[in-house]
Image: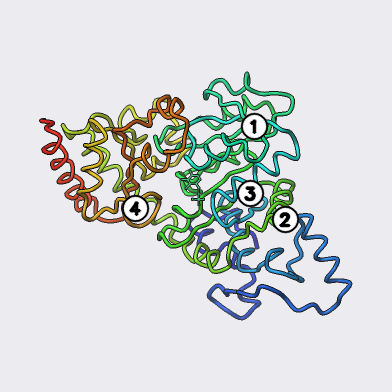
Amino acid sequence: MPHQDLSFETMAVHAGREDLATLGVHALPLDLSSTYPLNDLARGGESLELMAMGGQDKQNPVYSRLYNPTVGRFEEALAQLEGAAESVAFASGMAAMTACLLAAKQRGGHVVAVRPLYGGSDHLIASGLLGLEVTWAEPDGIREALRSDTALVIAETPANPTVTLLDIESVVAQACGVPVLVDSTFATPVLQNPLKLGATLVLHSATKFIGGHGDVLAGVVATNAEWATELRKVRVITGSVLHPLAAYLLHRGLPTLSLRVRAAQEGAKVIAQKLKDHPGIKAVHYPGLEGGDPSGLIGTQMRGPGSLIAFEVENFEFASVVMGSVKLMTPAVSLGSVDTLIQHPAALTHRVVNAEAKAHSGIGPGLLRLSVGIENPDDLWADLEQAIVKAMAKTGIHA
Ligand SMILES: *Cc1c(COP(=O)(O)O)cnc(C)c1O
């Protein structure tokens, strides 16, 4: 039974578990089979052919690169949470992005993308590795960037690493019918549903909030049946499948996704304000702060500002001392875990992005990105504040 009429929290607990009672189990089963017994050769061959073209045959999986029930249940759940017809899971967020680009390439050789994007996505699109041409557009210049062979418009909101918000409805309107992909990793389905605003594909690095515990690498795309078929076809051909153990862990974590996202968000609101009030900090980028959401997208497009904060300090040395002095937080890339991570985008996640593009997006030597976890914000602030005080002393910056 689909749960579309239920609230998000209820859906997150029950989605993708519809067949468990019939199976006679209560917890999610983990099916690690790489292959499946074939009762009938002719039927097996037909199933293989169907799935090689992106179709599904849950009754006759044949081989785990074609279908795996543990992965399938997670996909069913994620589709429900995004209000999508289907979702397709991949080995990582980058595998998911690659599959979207390869599927788009069947329709045309050009994409339009809005910066900033996650550094890896920027690298993939800018590299030309997949044989697609790209036009980088300003948020209000998408329409002008379209060509007759534009197959996809790519946007990320909130954007990594600056937490800049894009108006999804405006992106969709400017795309003039070209499918829009929104990377919604920072928002999760708890805080926004891009498909309801007209996007065709919503991508998550499930490595982040959806996994939520820093122990899974995964990606997922929620979309309509037509694109899902194309994406499964690419996945079968290229082999970028999600491991069933990873799918099991992701699905196991979905019931607490909303609790985790909201608890981290409450902590982030506190930390963002304290950063803003601190004399050692030059600027704070967080849509939950007064003036931090000039387009008024919190409360309309998004149900909350999330738990990522970007903030600017004096210079690289200051940033480096802060990252090296935190004790409770972990100096590490990635985000969306129950624990707090701090990283330096220009030196790490966005290192490979073109220098002018970095400067244009505000990814400078003094920018730090904080992914606030679910720890008590008072403990987090005590840790961050002592690191900031140390950096002020070391770099000779006085309040
Ligand atoms: C991390 C990230 C990705 C890439 O995901 P992986 O799971 O690391 O491959 C894509 N988009 C955004 C916004 C990310 O933060």
Q: List x then y, in percent, for residue 100.
A: 65, 44
User: Which one is nearer the viewer's eye here, 253 or 341?
Assistant: 341
Measured in 3D between alpha carbons, the distance from the residue under mark 4 to the one under mark 1, in whole angstroms, is 37 Å
Local packing at callout 4 (Cα closer than 10 Å; few below 14, some 14-19, many 20+) is many
Residue most extreme to the top:
144
Q: Earlier in the sequence, mark 4 or mark 3?
A: 3
The amino acid marked with disc number 3 is Ala
Q: Which of marks 4 and 2 is in front?
A: 2
Sequence order check, earlier mark of 4 and 2: 2
Kind of residue at disc 1: Val
Instruction: Look at mark 1 in the image and give the residue it sits on.
Output: 111
Residue named by callout 4: 263
How many numbered dots are placed on residues in this image?
4
Q: Residue 10: where, in percent of width, then height? A: 50, 59
Residue with the mark numbered 3: 84
Mark 3 in CB contact with mark 2 (< 8 angstroms): no
Asked if marks 2 and 1 touch (Cβ < 8 Å), the reply is: no
Q: Which of pointers 4 and 1 lies earlier in the amino acid sequence?
A: 1
Could you tell me which quadrant the N terminus lies in? bottom right
Residue 397 in the image: above or below residue 89: above
Mark seen at residue 237: 2
The kind of residue tagged 2 is Ile
Q: Quadrant of residue 197?
A: top right
Q: How far apart are marks 4 and 2 (CA)?
A: 40 Å
The mark nearer the N terminus, 3 or 2, is: 3
Quadrant occupied by the C terminus? top left
- Left or right: 376 in relation to 245: left
> In what element is the residue under mark 3?
loop
